[in-house]
């Protein structure tokens, strides 16, 4: 729920969480998110992205965040917004030593016509992105409980 708490502190037009698990969805709903249910999470990250895009009804851009990145800071999300507002690109994304990807801020005009497939997500849209440097720790992605085993949180 780290990313939900971080996003709750940022003035956004709306907050959408794409969830397959109803219990997780209720946690997000309690923090002011609109919930979109993904009935087939096995179809890959692209299916969740498409559902989230289809739920957007206003705004200039979407801030795409992953729930399994527990160290993303509000300061980094603000840096993405500043870069986007400065007109550096129609997409801005995160980069560290060994990582390139979300969180990312992408123009709705790009997202509306995007049809992601499988586990690719928004990678295709980020090919022309402005890259915003972030500490490697903020880009850590924990897909399974086993990924936390032996992890030093300090």
Image: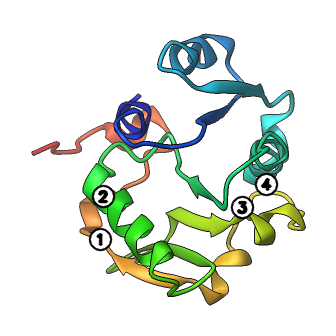
Whether the residues at callouts 1 and 2 have beta carbons within 8 Å, the answer is yes
Q: SS class of the residue under badge 1? A: loop
Whether the residues at callouts 2 and 4 have beta carbons within 8 Å, the answer is no
Question: Residue sitting at 59 percent across and 11 percent down?
Answer: 26
Question: Residue sitting at 90 percent across and 63 percent down?
Answer: 115
Percent position of residue 151, x then y = 23, 44
- Dot placed on the residue nearer the N-terminal end, 1 or 3: 3
Question: Residue sitting at 79 percent across and 44 percent down?
Answer: 57
- Dot placed on the residue nearer the N-terminal end, 2 or 4: 4
How far apart marks 4 and 1 lie (CA) works out to 24 Å
Residue 46 has which mark?
4
Q: Nearer the viewer, residue 139 or 55?
A: 55
Residue at which label 3 appears: 121
Percent position of residue 140, x then y = 36, 56
Q: Tell me the quarter of the picture where residue 153 sits.
A: top left
How far apart marks 3 and 2 lie (CA) works out to 19 Å
Q: Residues within 10 Å of mark 2 (few under 14, many from 20)?
A: some
Give the label, 4 or 1, closer to the camera.
1
Q: SS class of the residue under badge 4? A: helix
Q: Tell me the quarter of the picture where residue 136 sits.
A: bottom left
Q: SS class of the residue under badge 2? A: helix
Residue at which label 2 appears: 138
Q: Nearer the viewer, residue 67 or 6?
A: 6
Whether the residues at callouts 4 and 3 have beta carbons within 8 Å, the answer is yes
Whether the residues at callouts 1 and 3 have beta carbons within 8 Å, the answer is no
- Image position of 50 (left or right of 6): right
How far apart marks 4 and 3 lie (CA) works out to 4 Å
Q: Nearer the viewer, residue 69 or 34?
A: 34
How far apart marks 1 and 3 lie (CA) works out to 20 Å
């Amino acid at each position: 729920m780290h990313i939900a708490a971080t996003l709750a502190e940022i003035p956004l037009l709306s907050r959408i969480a794409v969830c397959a698990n109803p219990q997780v969805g209720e946690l997000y709903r309690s923090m002011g998110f609109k919930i979109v249910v993904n009935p087939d999470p096995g179809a890959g990250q692209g299916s969740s992205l498409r559902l989230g895009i289809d739920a957007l009804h206003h705004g200039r851009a979407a801030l795409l965040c992953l729930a399994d990145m527990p160290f993303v800071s509000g300061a980094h999300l603000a840096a993405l917004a500043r870069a986007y507002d400065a007109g550096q690109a129609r997409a801005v994304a995160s980069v560290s030593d060994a990582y390139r990807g979300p969180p990312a801020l992408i123009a709705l005009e790009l997202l509306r016509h995007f049809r992601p497939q499988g586990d690719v997500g928004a990678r295709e849209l980020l090919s022309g992105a402005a890259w915003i440097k972030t500490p490697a720790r903020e880009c850590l992605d924990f897909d399974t409980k086993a990924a936390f085993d032996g992890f030093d949180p300090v």
